[in-house]
Every structure is written in structure tokens, then in C-alpha cells.
Image (cartoon, coloured by chain):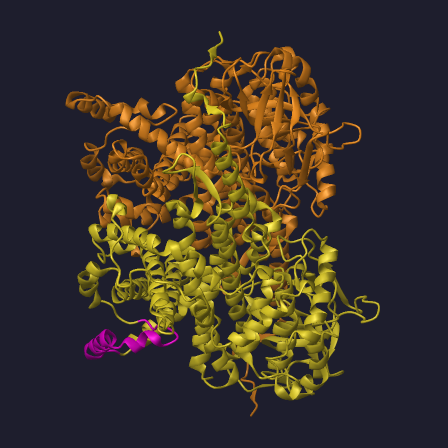
Chain colours: A yellow, B orange
Amino acid sequence: MTATTSPRPATSIGDPHVDVPALESVLLGRWGEIRRQARALLTDQRLHRVEGLSMAEHRERVLDQMRILATEGDVLRAFPAVLGGADDHGGSIARFEELIVGDPSLQIKAGVQWGLFASAILHLGTADHHARLLPGAMSIEVPGAFAMTETGHGSDVASIGTTATYDPATQEFVLHTPFRGAWKDYLGNAALHGTAAVVFARLITAPPGGRAVDHGVHAFYVPLRDPQTHAFLPGIGGEDDGLKGGLNGIDNGRLHFDHVRVPRADLLDRYGAVAPDGTYSSPIASPGRRFFTMLGTLVQGRVSLDGASVNVSKVALITAITYGNERRQFTGASDTEEVVLLDRQEHQRRLLPLLAQTYAQAFAHERLLETFDGVFSGVSDTDEDRQDLETIAAALKPASTWHALDTLQAAREACGGAGYLTENRLTSLRADMDVFVTFEGDNTVLLQLVAKRLLTDFSREFADADAGDLARIVAGRAVDAALHRTPLLRVVQTLADVGDARRSAGQVRSTESQRELLSGRVETMVSEVATALRPATKASKERAAVLFDRHQHELIEAARAHADLLQWEAFTAGLEKIEDPGTRQVLIWLRDLFGLILIERNLAWYLIHGRLSAGRARTVTSYIYRLLDHLRPHAKDLVAAFGYGPEHVRAAIATGAEAERQDEAREYARRLRASGDAPAPEKQATAPKQRS
Amino acid sequence: MTATTSPRPATSIGDPHVDVPALESVLLGRWGEIRRQARALLTDQRLHRVEGLSMAEHRERVLDQMRILATEGDVLRAFPAVLGGADDHGGSIARFEELIVGDPSLQIKAGVQWGLFASAILHLGTADHHARLLPGAMSIEVPGAFAMTETGHGSDVASIGTTATYDPATQEFVLHTPFRGAWKDYLGNAALHGTAAVVFARLITAPPGGRAVDHGVHAFYVPLRDPQTHAFLPGIGGEDDGLKGGLNGIDNGRLHFDHVRVPRADLLDRYGAVAPDGTYSSPIASPGRRFFTMLGTLVQGRVSLDGASVNVSKVALITAITYGNERRQFTGASDTEEVVLLDRQEHQRRLLPLLAQTYAQAFAHERLLETFDGVFSGVSDTDEDRQDLETIAAALKPASTWHALDTLQAAREACGGAGYLTENRLTSLRADMDVFVTFEGDNTVLLQLVAKRLLTDFSREFADADAGDLARIVAGRAVDAALHRTPLLRVVQTLADVGDARRSAGQVRSTESQRELLSGRVETMVSEVATALRPATKASKERAAVLFDRHQHELIEAARAHADLLQWEAFTAGLEKIEDPGTRQVLIWLRDLFGLILIERNLAWYLIHGRLSAGRARTVTSYIYRLLDHLRPHAKDLVAAFGYGPEHVRAAIATGAEAERQDEAREYARRLRASGDAPAPEKQATAPKQRS
């Protein structure tokens, strides 16, 4: 593809400049002040990861850090003002996400304590629980575990095996682990520090004189250990999960229960209560809906993992781009001057698309956080809002967690051997982030939830649409740009768009072309898989399951395409917030790079579906190279705008040390040449004596 | 793409069965007996990685393991028989590659000692060095560092800064580090255990009365530390590289030299000697050729990293496929029976293509090792053989090291939270393997070497080819299948093939179609980039450098395509070794899966270049699903044939423990149903009382 040698085109703004402080403010977003405070707190070395600690030492250090957070960390923002909090849901998550630059173990341990354990008491419990149980959880006087996952069941929470059978004679639940697979597992605070837990179990009770009914998963507050001796209470046992691939500052462990008696009052009964006589009641009639409502608070975890992952990607890019901008290797045009890595095409190709995607994810996360805040503050808390929030979180969390791993790895490799040294933190961060792609909802499972929602929207849209309706919907879409600003990009029919996409391919760079290509792909993929799955509605359960499984990969791909689009739309909307024309120009290039990389990644799809001709497909790649040329001079400013200082990045190679070394080496070479004492290279001297 | 629902087609062999022991023998290959011995040795727990050790403890343990190897490990096979070795080059590497299942740190530390330090004395030194220096290096009485890489220069060895200036007055070299960037860095054995090193430095000497000449990089034997006190000798200093992302059983460190005097006799002078009066002589006149000859022994490292990486991919797949075959999650067709993960399409999509590529790489590695053995044994040791060996190693090492990381990560994610536990080893292996992609030649740099070779072959082929020659070459290729059996797949013209490829696309599954598509891509890519670079031959150095850089990514992609083809050809040739018809059928499916995955990965390229129509491109994906269906029942046998036992895999989840848990859980559910005591699910019972 010789198109890559195209000369650098003229641009509307000849030599744009990035206004770093202004861009930093935009990126900090609505909760910028809280983020700044958190970052200021995180300059405190006591909150930094110390490498090389043993697992036991690391766990103790993180527990100490938790105590610092409990007193100095403003960690209760999400709790009600009456309980000492600030009713600030978005701000709480924003703050929490920043903890990751101290130590991911600290962020996750804080998440276990305040985001899961205390939060479950708050959201699943009622006034009595709040009064009795929240203070200890909030102050971490009671370190707590969130005992949902079992060895046998992770993402499929509905199938957990632990049972809580009500005994009206004593007004207690009998909490029991019936087999090894039902042990609670991977729980933070379970191995060591937790003195209580919120335990999820199938609530079984019988109405007076009736048969026992399994009411599905409910949450119970259960003391685990004697607070003094730290010995397990009777009937409770467990194991330490031991070393993990990362996050070793958290004491993950297993728990099992042998007919442990839990007082009736310790069922967290907001969504399901049991009367003294064993009668079950719930404000939500449908067991399925009740289950998903109870699990609704888990979305906090996904939202914050999304934000934390974006933050880690930022840190990795600061390190890799700083180093790539200083490190020299191999001569290029000159015999004596080695080239800065970031001036090499391949280095730009590896790092700058990741930078573009990190920006897209930062903007997407801000929108997700706003949606979250709307729902949790009650400002916009309809069923539909909640479903939208669940779906957006389920789409973005896989995208950003996988992206963080890709970015850390690319950064590590781009820094070579130096990237492998722990002092530069890339490998430790990657080890910690690894589990982000499978916990709090396995990414693959989450994407299937997104796909199901896309299919539901699709069929709802067309359930009783006659030809007239269809036309109206299609026409409506063509003119209604606001559609793309709704949080969830609803699925609409695409047949009429094919022609448009083809026409506009000539301007594949334009915002509208990118949008049509990206949204058209989602719509077509969903429509295709919906058509393929239609027979399932009339098939036997067996046949339907087989059919569904035969399209599992397509469903996941459609969900990923949707997540790509969400990020692209958020980036595009984010451009509106940028007033400085130079900054805006650079950010448009960066958004274009993101859009074109997405298109290039799925180029075969566009070609097969006739959305791009072979000729236009080639131009996608050549535009990408042009954009890399445009963006390269701004790479340093673009990572500076992330707003993390050296005390957050803490990588030896991101401190200018490499530039000093390079300068020293070049100065040595310069002086040697100037001195006239430089030895002649052999090829310029006499041929050496030939030995036989 | 509804084609994925195609019914399972009839096959030539209705229900093939894999003959596991026979397949295992094929995979063990020419050095099977040595591999079996090494694997038997590695059942010894003393050679196993112990997790959770501190860096200091891990280093000591690996040093102890080195001593075990030195006495019991048959580690001297590559050395001459007269020196106590076996003159067995291929066997030595085969054995060495297996060490990785004990602990990758051990493999790499052994590589530093015997494969680099002692090997440099052997290959770069002469009889006196062999007599004086080899015994200590071979017995590890003298643990040694291989001091080539500097902080400032890794892959670009030619530009290192350390100097060794000859002083005829004392007949010594003055070894000196002129600036910080010239510190030797990342050297195994340098931080702690090494008492000597082979140090690479620019040899500077003046003929009597003449001007000093820089003869480029040469190797010197340099004592580092007092063997008793372990204190650095005068003029030598260093630092510990400290913790790394993995391989922490190796004491990597830095070294610097302040005018350290090295006796003239300690220049390893096989390829460059200095007479007492300072006169330089060499059996190789060209400094460039001499440099590459001296670096030629480094190919051992690349060959063995290739083999070791393939072995790690095998271990990862044994774990993931065993677990995926037992673990159940989410119900499918039945309400009560959960589905085994490996029966899910997405799980097959994640793991089976990696299995196919691991087989391809195993076959490719065997051919590489045979080539290596031919060169190092002297059986086929022409310049061309050596260049072929270099190029194949430079192509395969990037492919297998990146593949090992991908495989470990996919395996880790496929095992969910269990995959993150250190007891299942996937995360530790990944951490250790991470550096494989940038050390012993950064993968990106190696691929550029491959690309340069492809370009050279291309231009050589056509340098003085008139039209008649061209036709002959093209015609020759079309009928000469033997061409593809030469170690390096030479680049030939492709214009005439386009039509063929289009015609044969109907049988995209056939061996010949796969070959045409894969080889045609390499040829076209090389031809395109050669055309684009042609102006560079007449351009200024500056312009040429810019032009070259503008095609850097294409060059790398062409080299990767070439590496893909090498693997595919090796797999295809390997099929010939399989006699049992059932096994052969399954392996053909596996090879087809590998070929089609390669084509699918680059589908956009085939579409843009008109090699596949949109319709045919769709069939690629549908064939892949059919192959997954065919292969899924054989997945367990295919990993069993890798021949590693539980004492090599050592993953708690690969021991059948999950199957036991699943059986226990299902038995519990079965008994409960049978007892009539099972609580009714709420949705089948009376609706719960509604609370207000």
C-alpha cells in the first residue's frame, strides 16, 4: 500500500497547539475537584505500593492504608448524609477510581469494604440494619467480605448452592454449604481480615403449613470471626486463596458454613422478608426481577472498574510515550544521530491508537458516571434508566479492562527491557489488572448481556411495526442526530442506509461517515443475528439452546461493536467541550484515528457487506498513517493532559532519566569527534591483516 | 452470517480416533528420547518452581538447581566430546527447552551459563581459552555473565559504547565504560552470582605507528568478583536490576568498568586477534560480516526460546482444555444440567485456534531445530545455510513468544478466577514469558531482519531476470512443490497466480488453496513493499531513511505473513509423518483450522487484493465453525499428545478436581430431587405476599 507515502496534507489549522491545562480540566470532568483532591491525597507515600513485599506484608500494608483512608480518605461520599455520608454517588466513584494509582490492591480492597460489603447493607438492608451494622462497616471497625461468588459459580450468581433455610421454631435461618462447589471463593477479606460478611444464599422457607419454597438468592449479614482472637466462629470454616497473579495486597479466601444459625433480623430484607411464621413477602412479585434488582448495586463495581482501568491506561501511556520520546536506537537519516523511538512508524502505530482509544474511553466513562449518578441519586431512576445503566456498564467494562491490558502490554514492550523492570511499574500494574477482565462479571458474559439487550430492543422496535412504522423509524433515524446522544444507542433498521454508506465512503474521514460505518455495523450485526435466531422462538428448548450457542460468537462481536460505537460517540460528543481551536483540531485528529482504527480492525466486515469498496478500504489505512503524522508532535501534550504527576506515575524511565543518558552519550560522541582522537572505523581504515 | 448453522458435514472417516501415544512420538520428534529423559528429570521436585519465595530466596533456589543440573542434568551435550561434551547441538537445545516446565528462571539461568557465557568462550575463543576457561564455565565453578546489552543499546548491538583499547606497552586491553548509557545491563548472573563475564566492547587498537582504529564489537573474558569474598574486583562496579516482571530467580544486574586492564590473551580471538605490537588481524575481512559471524552463536538463544515458548503454550492448553472440559456453568438445553464450558462456541473459538497454532509451531520448531543442528554440526554449514537459519529463527521466535503470551492469557481468562490463582501457574508463567518477546532480539527488530532478507531474496531473484527468466521462475513455482520444503520459503513473483487463487477459492479448504492464499500474500506484500522502496536506491540517505520508515509497518507485516506461512508449511509437512488414518484426519482438520484462522485474520487483505470474493470470505468463517465442531471431541486427546504429565503441569484445576466438584454438586441435586424434599422454585409456587 504505497498510499502510506502520501505527503502530509494541509490542515485547517497550520500548526495547532494543545492547551494542556484546559484539556486536563475537560478530562477531569464533572467530578474534577474530587479527582484533584484524590490525586493530592495519593501523593502520600503511605498510600503507594511498595514492591517486593511478601504477600503477608503486602496485605498488612494495604490494611493499614485502609485505616488511613477511613480517617483521611473521604470514603463515605456515597452514603446517606444522615449516616455521615454525602449522598454523592458519582463523586464517590470518581474518587475511588483514582485510588488505583496508589495501589490497585488498595482500590479493590476499598471496593470490597465500602463498595460491596457496606453498600450491600445500605442497599439491601433496611433502617434497622443501617443503624446496627453500617457504622462498623463504614469505619472498618468491621472489615467485611462480600460472599457471593462460589467455587462452582461466578458470573452465574442465580445458580449458587449455599442455602439459608428458615426455622420458625427459633426464628433463625440455617446457613449451609451443601457441597464443595458451593464454598464461597475469591472473597476479599475472607482469608484474614474479615470479621463479618454479607453472604448470598438461596432463601428457603415454608408458609405456615405449606411446602418449602426456594425464593432464590438473598443476602444475610453473618459474623465470621471473633473480633479479638480472629478465630472462625462455630460452624464457619475457610481457606486462604493464597498467592494470585496480582492484587496480593488483598486477602482473598474461601468460606463454608455448616448449619450456621443466622437470626431472622439479619436477613437484609429490603427486597424480600420472612415473617416470624415463615411467610415470605417482597415488594417485587417477579422472582427474576427481584433478583436483578438485588444485584443492581453490583453495577457500581463495573462502573468503577471501567474508570479505574482508563486511569491505568493513562499511566501506562505516560510512561511509554515519555520514554519513546527520549529513547534513541538505530541510526536513521544520519550516521551519527540515532532516532527517537516515537519517530518510528511502528512505534507510533503501536502507541498512538491506544492513546486515541484511551481518550475515547475517558469520555465514555464520564458519560457512564453521569448516568450512574442520575440513577443512584434518584434524579433519573426509572426502570429504563437502570437497564440503560446496566447495559452501558456491561459494554464499557469489558472494553476498558481489556484495553488496559493491551495498553500495559504494548507499553511494556515499547519500553523493552526497561519496561520489564518492576521499578517502571508496567508489569505489576498489568498483573494486578489481569483479573479485571473476569471479575465483577466475566467480560464475555457481560457482552452477552449487552447482546441480549440489543436483541430485545431490536425485536421490541419491530414487534408490531408494519411497513409504515418501519419507514417512519428509518426516516426518523436519518434526520435525528439526537438519537445518538441517548445513553444507549438503540438499534434501528439499516436497510435504507447501505446506499448512504457507500456514497459517503468518499469522505470516510468525516464524522458522519465514521458514524454511519460504525453504527451501521452494529445495526446490521444485530439484525443478522436476530434473523438467524428467529426460529428459536418456535423451536424446542433443546433446539433453541443449540441455535443460540451457534451464534454466541456473533452475539459477542455485536456487543463489542456496540461498545466501540459508545466510545466513539462519547469522544465525538466530548469534542464539543473543547473550546480552544488548536486543542480541538488535535482532538479531532485523535477521534478520527480512533474511528479509523475501529473501521480498519473490522475492514473485512465492511468489505464483505459492501459498505466499503476495496479502494476506499485502502484509504482507511493511508489516512491512519496521515493521522499518526499529525498527532505525533502532540503525543507528549496529550499524555500531559491526563494530569498525573511523577508521584503518581512513579516510573524511573518516565522521569527524564533516559533523556539525560542520551544527552550524555551524544555529548561524549560529539566531544570525541571534535577532539580528533576518535578511532577511525575499520571500514575507513586499512583492511586488517588476513589470518589464514 | 447464518452459514455457521450449517449441519455437520459427512467426513471421509466417520468417527476418527486419535492414537495418542503415536502422535506423542511424532511431536517429540527426532530428539524424542532426549526430551523424554529431560521430562523424567523434571519430575524431580527439587527442580520445580516454588511460588511465594522472596527474590533472594528464589535466586538461591535457582542457583542450587543449576548445581543439580551441572552434576545430573546432562547439560554439556553441545560441547565438543574432547571437552566432555557430546557434540550434540540439536539434542542440547531440545533438552534445554524442556527445563522451562521446571521453572523458566532455571531455563534462562542455564541459558546464560551454558548457552551464552560458556558458549561464547567455545565459539569465539580458541584452544587456549577452551583449555583455561571452559572447565570452570561448564562446571559452573565460575558462574558467568554475558555482558553484551547496555542500558543504551539492546537490539542494536553494533552501537554499544563500552571500549577496549589496546595498550602495547603492557599487552593489555583497557576496558572502559565512557558514559552511563554504556553500562552493561539486564545481565543474568551480574547482580550476584557471576564471578566472571564475557564482555562485549569495541576493540580499539593502532598498528605500529598508525592511527587508532575501531574494529567494532569483540568479546573479552573478564573476571568480575573475588570468588571467595564475592566483592567486585578493582575498577568494576555494578547494580542489581532488582525485581522484574518475572524470572526473579535470575540475578539480573548492571556492570561498569573503569579502565579495567584485561590481558591480551583474554580477548576471545577466533574472529579477530591483536598481535603484541597492536596489529589487528581477522580471518574475515569485512567488518560487517565479521560482526554478524561473531553474533551468529546468538541464534542458539532464539532457537531455544522458540522451542521453550511452544512448550509453555502446550502446558497452558493442557490446563485450560482440561478445565474447560470439566467446568460447568449456565444451563443450556436442559433446566437442570449445566453445560461444560468447552461445549460453548465462544470457548472453542478462544482455545482451539490456539491449539492449532501450537501444533503448527511445534512442527515448525522441529524443522528449525533440524536446520540448527545441520549448521552447528557442520553437516550443512554454508553461508546460505547460516543465513537461512538466522532468518527462520528470526521469523519463528517472534511468532512463538507472542503466541505463548496470547495462549497463557486466553487460558487464564478461560479458567476465570481459578486461572488467576498462582496454584494454577498460568499467571506466573505469563509473567516469566513476558520478556521473551523483547529479549534475545526484540520481536519487532527481528521481524525487520526477516523483512530485509525477504526483500534481498526478492531483488536477487529479479536483479537480472529478463522476461524469459521471469516466466521460467513463475512456471517453475507453479509445478514445484519441493520449493516449499526448503527451509526458507523464497520469495517469487506472483502476478501469474492471481487467477489461480481466484479459481481455487471455491475449495478454500484444500491444502493447495490454503498454500496459494498464504504464500501469495507473502509474495505480494514483499513485491509491493519492494516496489514502494525502489526509489530509495537512488535517493539521498535522508530520503531513503524516511521512505524506509514509512513502510516499516508493512515490512513487519510481511515478515509476520512469512512466519505464518513457515508454520503452516511445517504443519502440512508434519502431516506426512502421521500414519494412523484417524489421527491424520484429526490433524488435517487442525491444520485446516490453522490455515483458515490465518486467512480469516487477514481477510480484509484478501478481499482488497481480489484473492477472495465476499461470498468466499464468508465461507472461511463458516468452515472455521465446522472445524471447531469436528475438533472439539478430540481436544482432550490433542493436549494429551503433548506428553506432559501432572508433575509437569502442576495446576490444581488440571487434576480432575473440578470434575469431582461438578459430580458432587450434580449428585447432591439429583438426590435432592429424588428425595421429594427439594423446595419448589418460587415461580412454580404461590406468589409471595406483596409488601407495600
Quarter location, residue B384: top left
**Magenta highlight on residue B409:** no
Q: Would you say residue A601 is visible in this rendering?
A: no
What is the magenta segment's predominant secondary structure? Answer: helix
Instruction: Give x and y (percent) for residue B548.
Output: 32, 38
Q: Is residue A399 above or below residue B277?
A: below
Instruction: Give x and y (percent) for residue A303.
Output: 51, 70
What range is drawn magenta here? A465-491
Instruction: Give x and y (percent) for residue A413.
Output: 50, 46
Determine whether, in the image, residue A262 is placed left or right of residue A29: right
Q: Residue at x 64, y 12 (%)?
A: B128
Q: Is residue A382 above or below residue B541?
A: below
Determine whether, in the image, residue B449 is placed left or right of residue A666: left
Spot the residue most to the top. A692
**In front of the other: A653 or A335:** A335
**In front of the other: B213 or B524:** B213
Spot the residue most to the left. B467
Instruction: Give x and y (percent) for residue A445.
Output: 48, 62
Q: Residue at x 43, y 76 (%)?
A: A388
**In front of the other: B344 or A249:** A249
Spot the residue most to the right. A229
**Magenta highlight on residue A466:** yes
Spot the residue most to the bottom. B692
Q: Is residue A420 above or below residue B220?
A: below
Q: Residue at x 21, y 67 (%)?
A: A497
Q: Would you say residue B72 is visible in this rendering?
A: yes
